[in-house]
Image (tube, rainbow, N blue to C red):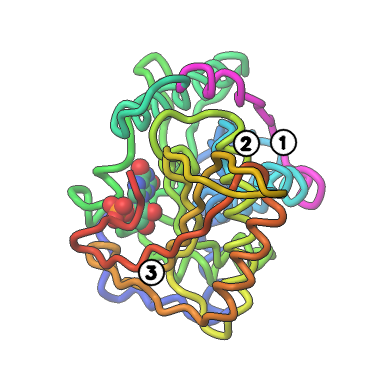
Amino acid sequence: MSGNVRPESMKRINTPELAEAFINEQVEAVREQVGDKKVLLALSGGVDSSVVAALLIRAIGKQLTCVHVNHGLLRKGEPEQVIRVFRDQMDANLIYVDAVDRFLDKLAGVSDPEEKRKIIGKEFIDVFAEEAKKLDGIEFLAQGTIYPDILESDGVKAHHNVGGLPEDLDFELVEPVKLLYKDEVRVVGKALGLPDNMVYRQPFPGPGLGVRCVGAITRDRLESLREADAIVREEIGKLDETPWQYFAVIPDMQSTGIKDGKRYMGWAVVIRAINTVDAVTAESVVLPWETLRTIRDRVIAEVPGVNRVLWDMSDKPVSTIEWE
Ligand code: XMP
């Protein structure tokens, strides 16, 4: 798709038929741009990169290589789902990179949030560039850029997104969804056959659980966060109307618990659920007591090391959505 301005005549893609038409058009455009050359894509499992992957698989099949970097900060089940959907079901060329130790070793002892973000961003680019250099004949780099990324180059996402690729990886970009809004990307993803929990995924920061395991990340606290987060998402996900974003946080502090008459120190899990239009302001969602109680009971029973469950009822401003 050429140009970075959405033509006024472009229809809002909000039906399966319009999505199909868009897909057909982009399949042709990508084939024309790429010819018989190879394309590389960093596939995080998020909506945008997943939709680009599915679209390119349809357009050019094995000419696309997807690289999925597991940095250890993904949510429960995410890497497995990327492999299942793209390698097993869509027969993609998928390179899975287990970089968990590499990231967690670099992050050990680092408590400053911006420093953590920088390390995660830089390490991600290094791992991806290393994988790219191992491959022969790649000439194109696909990206899940969407229209708000272009419009809001000074906005929240740009502020959070880190770095670019090293200059020696000089690829031409393939950005098939760059003129689409998020809701349109989801309609296209659905038409491409991606599962609902991928297409309707809530926003998830690039540094992932890294900014929700507050302070210096330790492996045991991170594992407990991953488990607690899965419970929080499962239980809140059962509500008829789900909030815009909901997740768990583990602060870097300990609190006293009591078991079999003995006191011991453990962690506290924080439940965060917010509604927002644009993530610039946000309102804490009033959750039913039933849901809160089930989360409390399950977290205490199922998550190692946790002896307290808290509910973050703060609005933005002044409290940001993420804790770091
Ligand atoms: P805050 O915490 O600034 O978050 O109120 C606003 C929105 O941005 C997401 N967020 C991030 N996204 N990289 C991202 O790609 C990041 O480092 C990052 N930090 C926050 C956050 O989840 C919320 O939706």
- Write down the residue under mark 1: 93
**The magenta segment:** 87-107
**Where residue 42 sits in the image (x, y, percent)?**
53, 36
Q: Does the residue labelled 3 lie within 8 Å of ligand 1?
A: no
Tell me, yes or no, whether the highlighted magenta stretch contains residue 272: no
Amino acid on which the number 2 mark rests in the picture = Cys
Disc number placed over residue 274 in the picture, else none: 3
Image-quadrant location for residue 63: top right
**Where residue 79 sits in the image (x, y, percent)?**
67, 42
Q: Is residue 3 in view from this perspective?
A: no
The reply to whether discs 2 and 1 touch (Cβ–Cβ < 8 Å) is: yes
Tag nearer the camera, 3 or 2? 3
Horizontally, residue 323 falls left or right of residue 97, namely: left
Alpha carbon distance from label 1 to label 3: 37 Å
The reply to whether discs 3 and 2 touch (Cβ–Cβ < 8 Å) is: no
Q: Earlier in the sequence, mark 3 or mark 2?
A: 2
Amino acid on which the number 3 mark rests in the picture = Ile
